Amino acid sequence: MSVLRPVILAASGSSRLQRAVTGFPVSAAVVRRFVAGETRAELEPVVRELLADGRMVSVDFLGENTTDHRIAEETVAEYLDLIDLLADVWRAVSAAPADARWVRPAEVSVKLSALGQALGPDGPGIAVENLRTICRRAAERGVWVTVDAEDHTTTTATLGTVHLLRSEFPWLAVAIQAYLYRSAEDCAAAAASGARIRLCKGAYREPAAVAHHRTADVDAAYRDCLATLMRGSGYPMVATHDPAMIERTALLARECDRARGDLEYQMLFGVRPDEQRRLVAQGRAVRVYVPYGRQWYGYLTRRLAERPANLMFFGRALLSR
Ligand code: FDA
């Protein structure tokens, strides 16, 4: 892993740095590479273009670690409007893929910490109710929901919340981070339950007591989790830009007789767009994770930590203004 990764991930938690960077006038140009816009109006053409191009979307309204009830309520309201927008855009775009029995091209991604999970002792219950409200609207409008994975202190609560609500909304999905030691077991349970699971490597700064740190170990854990999910009865969503993992997925798909509609590839907006299009041209199902909103700082610093080339892009943009 990059020597810069721990430094940048530490910066992702700094509110002082956040205030300084988000106030800097260059931010918009840099952020636009990874973030679709600050508002739904800016998001809409991005989503329309992706769907028309044959890619599916999972849209994240940026925000996390809410410690204010009012902000959690505003976040829910934004998600309800977002779901309506996605349903309308999807119906207006006839070229988007409509192949599988139950695959939904439009999805929202949501962080439970943005819905109030961290609001004291009542937080987890508040997050469950807020997520239920979002899922109800999603069910009405034919949109899917995936719950993002945050830092390891939230994993048990997040998986528990999704497990609870899956009895009402069987399509509700959750992300699992391969770098966590516990994820081998979590994937085995998910694979047996037939759940929809997004498998990612993991993007947070975690202690060695709970997570692999070495690249080779994280990759090996990802391969193991991937095999478990692909051989299970659920719907794997393979969230990675790593060519080795993409190739491994194709091999496992053949081995497990999984066709289009039985799994999907996922990548982040602004990352490897040519590879996204190549996979679509090969007839594979691809979903792009599209973030929007003003709270982009934590998201962007995690992207910078993943790839020093992203950091150089950021630095160049700062210097060129
Ligand atoms: P990784 O960073 O390990 O790189 C491996 C190889 O991939 C590189 O050597 C290079 O060959 C190629 N590559 C990677 N990035 C590239 C680039 N920009 N350009 C060219 N080549 C590149 N995390 C989390 O903790 N919780 C979550 O809920 C989610 N959700 C999520 C959704 C989706 C759709 C994705 C794609 C990712 C997430 N993540 C996440 C982030 C994830 O955990 C991880 O941090 C990043 O995806 C980076 O890991 P990769 O597997 O992509 O490749």
Image (spheres, grey):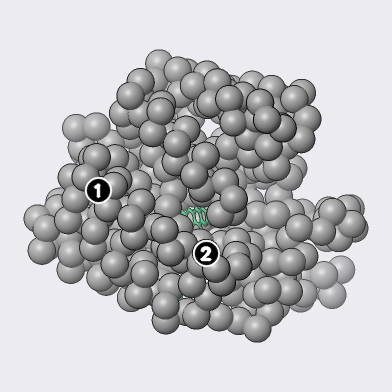
Residue 85 to residue 98: above or below: above
Asked which secondary structure carries label 2, the reply is loop
Badge nearest the viewer, 1 or 2: 2
- Mark 1, Cα crowd under 10 Å, few <14 / some 14-19 / many 20+, is many
The quarter holding residue 12 reads bottom right
Q: Amino acid at mark 1?
A: Ala
Residue tagged by mark 2?
210
**Residue name at image x 66 percent, y 26 percent:** 122
Residue tagged by mark 1?
191
**Residue name at image x 74 percent, y 42 percent:** 294
Residue 69 to residue 19: above or below: above
Q: Amino acid at mark 2?
A: Val
Q: Would residue 143 be visible to someone looking at this image?
A: no
Residue 203 to residue 78: above or below: below
Of 230 and 19, nearer the camera is: 230
The label number, if any, that marks residue 96 in the structure image: none
Quarter of the rendering occupied by the N terminus:
bottom right
Q: Give the CA distance from mark 1 to mark 2.
A: 22 Å
Residue 99 to residue 289: above or below: above
